[in-house]
Amino acid sequence: MSNEEFDVDEYEKGAEYAPLPLEGLIYYLKHGREIEFSYQGQSYFIDHSRKGRTVWIDKTAVSKTFEKNFEDHLSEIFLKGKSLSDIFRDEEGLLESLY
């Protein structure tokens, strides 16, 4: 499924705590959204600041900050031994909130 095939309206009808596919994650990142999600019982937050994007647990950064094209670095960020790209490709990241 490409980004163009991700049906935002259909997904957002039942989005809270629903598995977010990789295409959806990329769609939201490219559209400037901040994303709160959980993986294996832990909540994470992907922010969007002037410095770029970072993955956080509470107030602790768990990734470096990527200034541009964060979606191109998803395979470089690991949570509990698994890359963000694989977490969302396997639909194991559960959307908690969009900002």
Image (tube, rainbow, N blue to C red):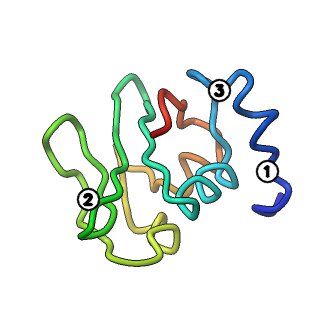
Residue at the image position 64 percent from the left and 52 percent from the top? 22
Q: Report the Cα–Cα distance between label 3 and label 1.
A: 13 Å
For marks 1 and 2 on the same chain, the one whose residue lies earlier in the sequence? 1
Q: Amino acid at mark 3?
A: Ala
Q: Report the Cα–Cα distance between label 3 and label 2.
A: 25 Å
Position of residue 15 relative to residue 30, above or below, is above
- State which mark lies toward you, 3 or 2: 3
Residue at the image position 58 percent from the left and 53 percent from the top? 28
Q: How many marks?
A: 3
- Tell me if 44 is positioned left or right of 95 in this view: left
Residue at the image position 52 percent from the left and 67 percent from the top? 71
Which disc, if any, is residue 15? 3
Which disc, if any, is residue 6? 1
Residue 46 % position (x, y): 37, 49
Which disc, if any, is residue 63? 2
- Tell me if 93 is positioned left or right of 38 in this view: right
Position of residue 13 relative to residue 87, above or below, is above
Q: Amino acid at mark 2?
A: Ser
Residue 75 % position (x, y): 48, 66
For marks 3 and 2 on the same chain, the one whose residue lies earlier in the sequence? 3
- Tell me if 15 is positioned left or right of 58 in this view: right
Residue at the image position 26 percent from the left and 68 percent from the top? 50
User: Which class describes the residues within 10 Å of circle 1: few (<14), some (14-19), or many (20+)?
Assistant: some
User: Which class describes the residues within 10 Å of circle 2: few (<14), some (14-19), or many (20+)?
Assistant: some
Which disc, if any, is residue 25? none
- Image quarter in which the C terminus is found: top left
Q: Amino acid at mark 1?
A: Phe
